[in-house]
Amino acid sequence: MTFSEFETVVELRRYTLHPGRRDELIELFEREFVEPQEAAGAHLFGLFRARASPDEFVWLRGFRSMEARKQALEEFYFGPVWKEHRAAANATMIDSDNVLLLRPVRRGLASPPPGPGVHVTVSAAPAPPPEEAFAAFETEPSPNTFPQLPVRTDGPFSVSFSRVASESSFELVPTSRSLIR
């Protein structure tokens, strides 16, 4: 399995947290949730602090297909690790429903170009990716195969990742476990 196979279906998850609790969630998340999700068939390749939003945690989770997504999420969220730690994780969150379900337009999360900074642009309408984007996605139109975790349906959206800031992008700062740096 290669990293790029997990770019077929991607969740861009943006959590709004209670003030001052982001590092608490990141520590719990990195200690307890990465390996069990990967063992279930998800691939967590981006874990970030939003530079301009001190109470936002942003992360990217990929799957090989919508069916693989359903199976991985069922295994993790109905399994023992989530049951043990969900109360602690949920206690840090105000909102965990800002989730875009995406499919690739231009793959490249697996091998971003060298350089500092990860900038994300989310557009509320289909748009071609900017030239400087190393990866670009659009709304995945398939029905959500795991309705226990809502995804936004107010799209379509275009999402691009770049090393270059733009007027409409926001900067992500990788955590210690993020594969995208």
Image (cartoon, helix red, strand yellow):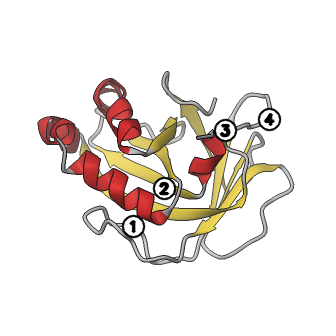
**Observer-nearest of 77 and 153:** 77
Circle 2: residue type: Glu
Q: Mark 2 packing: few (<14 Cα in 10 Å), some, or many (20+)? A: many
Q: CA distance from mark 2 to mark 3?
A: 17 Å
- Residue 146, given in percent of the width and then of the height, sits at 32, 65
Q: Mark 3 packing: few (<14 Cα in 10 Å), some, or many (20+)? A: many
- Residue 30, given in percent of the width and then of the height, sits at 37, 27
**Observer-nearest of 98 and 51:** 98
Q: CA distance from mark 4 to mark 1?
A: 29 Å
Label 2 vs 3, first from the N-terminus: 2
- Disc number at residue 151? 1
Label 2 vs 4, first from the N-terminus: 2
- Are the residues flagged by discs 2 and 1 in contact, CB closer than 8 Å? yes
State the SS at label 3: strand
Residue drawn at point x = 39 percent, y = 67 percent: 151
Label 2 vs 1, first from the N-terminus: 2
Relative horizontal placement of residue 134, taking residue 92 as reference (left or right):
right
Give the answer, above or below, for where 66 lies relative to 85: below
Residue 158 shows in the view: no
- Disc number at residue 113? 4
Circle 1: residue type: Val
- Disc number at residue 134? none
Residue ID for mark 3 = 118
Residue ID for mark 2 = 11
Relative horizontal placement of residue 13, taking residue 170 as reference (left or right):
left
Relative horizontal placement of residue 81, taking residue 101 as reference (left or right):
left
Residue 108 shows in the view: yes
Label 4 vs 3, first from the N-terminus: 4
Residue drawn at point x = 43 percent, y = 51 percent: 14
